[in-house]
Amino acid sequence: MILEALSSAVLGLVLAWVATQRLGHRLPARPLVLSTGVAGALLGAFLMHGALDASTLLVLLGAAAVSVASVSLLLRPAGRLRRRSATA
């Protein structure tokens, strides 16, 4: 279980780092993104291990899915929002 938690945390850290490299202009501060990725991965591993009593591969897949989902919640819109007037 300790090895699953450690590998899930590393997986979440790597996924969050990749997100900051590719989408850095749309994400908040890097420490927030990295910690969110790790926390999401640990939560996903806990849920998969507790709910399904799954194998290590399924635990890591669940950790990756929850980590990516939690980091995606931090994304901001790419451009400025276009506001139209009430008469348009």
Image (cartoon, rainbow, N blue to C red):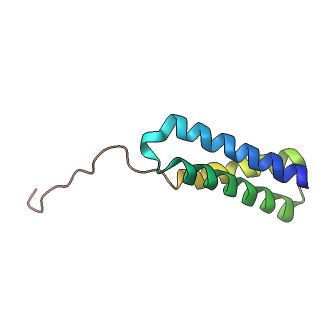
Which residue is painted at 75% across and 51% down in the image? 62
Which residue is painted at 64% across and 51% down in the image? 37
Q: Is residue 59 left or right of residue 26?
A: right
Q: Is residue 32 above or below residue 17?
A: below
Residue placed furthest toward the front: 31
Total label count?
0
Q: Is residue 4 left or right of residue 73?
A: right
Q: Position of residue 38 (x, y in %)?
A: 69, 52
On the rendered image, what quadrant is the C terminus found in?
bottom left
Q: Out of 18 and 58, give the one closest to the viewer.
A: 18
Residue placed furthest toward the left: 87
Which residue is painted at 60% across and 37% down in the image? 18
Q: Out of 60 and 24, give the one closest to the viewer.
A: 24
Q: Position of residue 61 (x, y in %)?
A: 76, 46
On the rendered image, what quadrant is the N terminus found in?
bottom right
Q: Is residue 30 left or right of residue 80?
A: right
Q: Position of residue 5 (x, y in %)?
A: 83, 53
Which residue is painted at 16% across and 55% down in the image? 84
Q: Out of 15 and 58, give the one closest to the viewer.
A: 15
